[in-house]
Amino acid sequence: MQDAPNRPYHHGDLRRAVIETALDMLREEKGWQFTLREVARRAGVSHAAPYKHFPDKAALLAEIAMIGFDRLRASLAAATPKAAKTLRDEIAPIARAYVAFGTDNPALYRLMFSADEGKAVGMHLNERALAVFDILLEILRRGQAAGSIRKRPIEGQAAAGWGLIHGMTMLAIDGLLVPEKVGSAPLDAALSTLVEGLGNPAT
Amino acid sequence: MQDAPNRPYHHGDLRRAVIETALDMLREEKGWQFTLREVARRAGVSHAAPYKHFPDKAALLAEIAMIGFDRLRASLAAATPKAAKTLRDEIAPIARAYVAFGTDNPALYRLMFSADEGKAVGMHLNERALAVFDILLEILRRGQAAGSIRKRPIEGQAAAGWGLIHGMTMLAIDGLLVPEKVGSAPLDAALSTLVEGLGNPAT
DNA sequence: ATACATTGTTGACAGTGGCTACTTAAGGGG
DNA sequence: CCCCTTAAGTAGCCACTGTCAACAATGTAT
């Protein structure tokens, strides 16, 4: 990392570097211990340098969590199929991308949902977080309009979808989706049940 | 707590007291910071006393997590309806009890699922944790036998059920089941979708 | 060129936490 | 009655963290 002995006194873009380093750390470690000092260490600066760019630890964490939502939304958007024949074909790639984001960035995902003093609520009502949720809502809306999804209050269906995917993601992060308990393809199976729960039986 | 100034030098039953105190702490605090010193403080003993009963912090945590599984299983067993007419009537009370356990013991629930160094896997393959899972499996087995549940690999259906309930529990603990996102009765709605996903459309 | 603002470094402080001696009290078996 | 094991208390080590203050280097506007 800091193999630049002739690095200038001023980093030049430390703010970004700190965020990037922090994201790296959250990508690698499952366990959710995060210290400003280690971020500084790995960024190759002194332990107090980050304070020139962030008032305190919480501020850095908040900013990183927001970036997490942005990236998650981008991931889901990228995974959205152009034209899907069945409801399952529409939902499955997105769900897979969601879970993959969680397992690829375990600590970041935890951070995004960490309820430190009920602060998570505010985070999740932020527009950048709501943008993620909107992807789910949009699918449901389109499905209802097309008749492939039951006509039910959409928030309730969103609760089911979000709950299931969030739960599967958490279980996956914690390594609990072992064949002994949930078989060999738990996400596929869970999606089948979800799709059938959402799907319109009339079709 | 330690309002016994004439308390004898030997506590008498410190082991149990430590566990009980720890469970109390995990019941109150959402945030998952757990220190042996505070347990000792609240138990009214010196900060080193617990070491006479537990080799280290991890041992205490492991034991507490196991007790958590026992209590969760007991909760679910107590909530199991005697005779349910519909699949939903059979599942809903148990699901509600599960979520309630999580929101009533937020930090304990987190502990039971905390993947410290992939240690969670071992915990969840322990018989006391599997006993909880068996309640879910039993429902599915009975439902399939009675024809009220689709004939599908049971592990996959278990994945869906577990994932959904775990997810809803986590979201509830983090206070994220706000009406703005998931409506006013998210658990009810999610259960509807789940039941319909599991249920046999032929009936 | 010089004064100022910015962005680093160094060092320290206060608090915390796990854990390990050593000491002291209590109880029980010989 | 004595001794030894057990279970508690006291003190402290060591590592670590967030944060702040003082200082140094660099860039920038006048």
Image: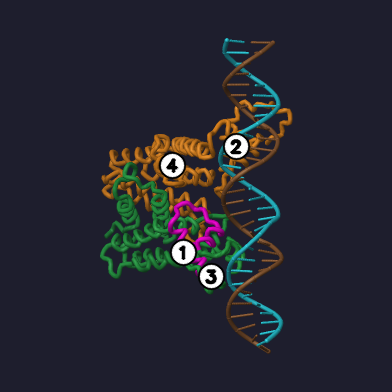
Chain colours: A orange, B green, C brown, D cyan
Q: Are marks 2 and 3 on the same chain?
A: no
The answer to whether the residue labelled 2 contacts the one labelled 3, judged by CB atoms less than 8 Å apart, is: no
* Mark 1 or 3, closer to the camera: 1
Image check: B57 left or right of B78?
right
Q: Are marks 1 and 2 on the same chain?
A: no
The answer to whether the residue labelled 1 contacts the one labelled 3, judged by CB atoms less than 8 Å apart, is: no
Chief secondary structure of the magenta span?
A: helix
* Mark 4 or 3, closer to the camera: 3
* Mark 1 or 4, closer to the camera: 1
The residue positioned 30% from the left and 70% from the top of the image is: B82
* Mark 2 or 3, closer to the camera: 3
Residue beneath label 2, please? A21
Query: How far apart in space, not on screen, are marks 2 and 3 (Cα)?
Result: 45 Å
Q: Is residue B25 visible?
A: yes
Residue beneath label 4, please? A94
Q: Is residue B129 visible?
A: no
**Which secondary structure, mark 1?**
loop
Residue beneath label 3, please? B14
Q: Position of residue D14 (x, y in %)?
A: 70, 52
Q: Are marks 4 and 3 on the same chain?
A: no
Badge 2 or badge 4: first in the primary sequence: 2
Q: Position of residue B203 (x, y in %)?
A: 27, 60
The amino acid on which the numbered mark 2 sits, given as a three-letter code, is Thr
**Which secondary structure, mark 3?**
helix
Q: Quadrant of the N terminus of chain A?
A: top right
The amino acid on which the numbered mark 4 sits, given as a three-letter code, is Ile
